[in-house]
Amino acid sequence: MVKRHLQLSGLLMFLFLAACQPPLVTPVPVTIAPTSTFMPSPTPLPTETPTSEPSATPRPLGCAEISGRLEDFQVEDKQLSSKAMDVKVYLPPCYGQDVSTKYPVLYLIHGQSFTNDQWVRLGVPETLDAWFVAGKYKPFIVVFPNDEYNLQDWSQSNFDDFFSAALIPWVDGHYQTCTQRACRAVGGLSRGATWAVVLGLNDWQLFGAFGAHSLPDVPFVEANVRDRFKEMAAADGHARVYLDTGSEDGHHLKAEMFEGYLKKYGITHTWTVFPGGHNEEYWQSHLTDYLNWYASLWQAR
């Protein structure tokens, strides 16, 4: 009886506990149709544009050179002189990179008691380097000949003969020069100015222009000046002429006399009287005036 009572009690306990559990749910499989899901495309990260190593700013000359070069030579002609002529040659930046390029040539002659480094010391190479690299002017070659016997009376010297017969052919034979008259000019300081006038008139077929800076002497009588320009006019035109002198230059009357000849015969020219004397301080202060004038000769080429 006791045993049966215990069994009945156990059954009641089981039923009570079962009633306290939550009902079990049999999972029913559910199929979810796939839908198009937006997947954000990756945002491109900012990237740096590939850059090369810094290079020189492209220059009007077409190369990265920022300076020209000076070369020193000796030109010989035993028939004209027993002594060779010392010559400096300025070559502009990029010279020689295009062998088809032909350059105008400016010949600059130093003054008495100086040598052919005078124009170099005054700053010609540095000034032209800056201008050519900036594209201000078309490049040209500059030749600085040495007047060895510059203390000798110019009328007793054959410097001009050597210049025309030996120096110019040598330059044209060694460099990429334009050999037309219009491509060649000559200028000088003091005694060099006298030589520029002598060459510009006696050998006018060779020079399209000449400049006389602080002319200390008039190497021709008036009739000769007139006749030379008549010859030019009958050929291919007058040479272009630049004259200047200092207001305190002891030789200014000579320069004024020559300018008077040009004015009398209707020769177009540039004439300026600047403040100053007959010295390097004066010439250096007007170096850019001179070079601007020479450089402008060839800008329409």
Image (cartoon, rainbow, N blue to C red):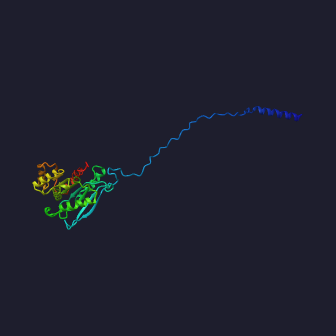
Q: Nearer the viewer, residue 287 or 17?
A: 287
- For this view, does 62 lie left or right of residue 294? right
How many numbered tags mark residues here? 0
Quadrant of the rendering where the N terminus is positioned: top right
x, y (%) of residue 9? 83, 33
x, y (%) of residue 271? 16, 50
Please report the residue visible at 85 percent of the width from the left and 35 percent of the height from the top.
Answer: 7
- For this view, does 194 lie left or right of residue 87? left
Relative vertical location of residue 76 with respect to residue 279 in this rendering, above or below: below
Q: Nearer the viewer, residue 236 or 67?
A: 236
x, y (%) of residue 136? 28, 49
Find the residue positioned furthest to the front. 235
x, y (%) of residue 178? 26, 54
Please report the residue visible at 21 percent of the width from the left and 57 percent of the height from the top.
Answer: 108
Q: Nearer the viewer, residue 111 or 232?
A: 232
Residue 73 visible in the displayed image: yes
